[in-house]
Image (spheres, rainbow, N blue to C red):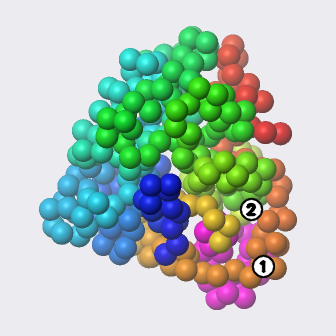
Amino acid sequence: MRYLEFKNGDRVASLGLGTWKSAPGEVYDAVRTAIKIGYRHIDCAAVYGNEAEIGKAFADAFKDGDVKREELWVTSKLWNTAHKKDDVRPALEQTLKDLQLDYLDLYLIHWPIAMKPGAGFPQSADDFLTLAEAPLEDTWQEMEAAQADGLVRHIGVSNFNIATIELIAQSAKVMPEMNQVEMHPFLPQHKLVNYCQSKGIHLTAYSPLGSSDRPRKQENEPSLMGHEVVKTIADAQGVTAAQVLLAWQVNRGVAVIPKSTNEGRLKQNLEAASIELSEDQMKHLNDLNESFRYIDGTIWTIEGSPYALEDLWEF
């Protein structure tokens, strides 16, 4: 297993378990199984709606001696409805309660989008707060306070571009230590990766296999695992197309969090972290860039929204 190392010496496994879309009744077994076969990096979020079940899995894994708390890296995320200064700490405390943990290893601002408490996902423009009403700088200040108080060991962001990172950096006492974004060979994010790595910000890739089971799919989406280059490399390596896509992330120095609830695929995904791709194979995958986003962000730009896609992504 490869690791990403933080300035204080903490390390996170480059391949972890994603829990987005893991259904209630399934995620408990998935987390227990993942820990037993060697996963030590679990990615969570309040909005996924399954943190209480994951917390039960953690508690039982600790009780049964499958893993010690200090051996496990747990990430969670602050949802858009808790960006105001007085809402950050209660949201974090609820996540800690649900996950049955005293601290998180990493806490991220989930999106650079602010919404009114209780809104969930936006149904109308009235559900949003502008960044003037809930400044990202204020949200970040509360993230720093949570870190200072020992509730989280590391803090970072998710779905942030260069401009939004620099916005909070202007007043930050602590720079973001992680940026979690969609990444795969159709969206390699070379500019963002180079920027973050130049600033000492690690990256985690979500939807690394195309997230085919997500809601709000687009018509005629390109298939990552069906691409001829990916299949050719998989044949040459004697592995699956999914393992090639995961190995590409690890080989380029970023973390990756594929989701699965199937024991066989959990094992295959974990094994992908040990696959070495050649320079030519990496180049062929890097050159697939089609600038295609599976998670396109249009949910945040409904009619009347104060946000535009240009606020989210580099084009």
* Rendered residue at 68%/67% (across/down): 252
Residue 86: mark? none
Q: Circle 2 is placed at which residue position?
A: 185
Task: Give residue 39's position: percent from left, percent from top.
Answer: 39, 68
- Helix, strand or loop at disc 2? loop
Task: Please determine whether, in this image, residue 18 is positioned above or below residue 305.
Answer: below
Residue 268 seen from this side: no
Amino acid type at image mark 1:
Glu
Task: Give residue 310's position: percent from left, percent from top.
Answer: 78, 30
Q: Quadrant of residue 129?
A: top right
Q: Which span is picked out in magenta? A: 225-250
Q: Circle 1 is placed at which residue position?
A: 279
Q: Is residue 170 left or right of residue 8?
A: right
On whether residue 234 falls in the magenta region, the answer is yes
Amino acid type at image mark 2:
Pro
Task: Give residue 248's position: percent from left, percent from top.
Answer: 67, 70
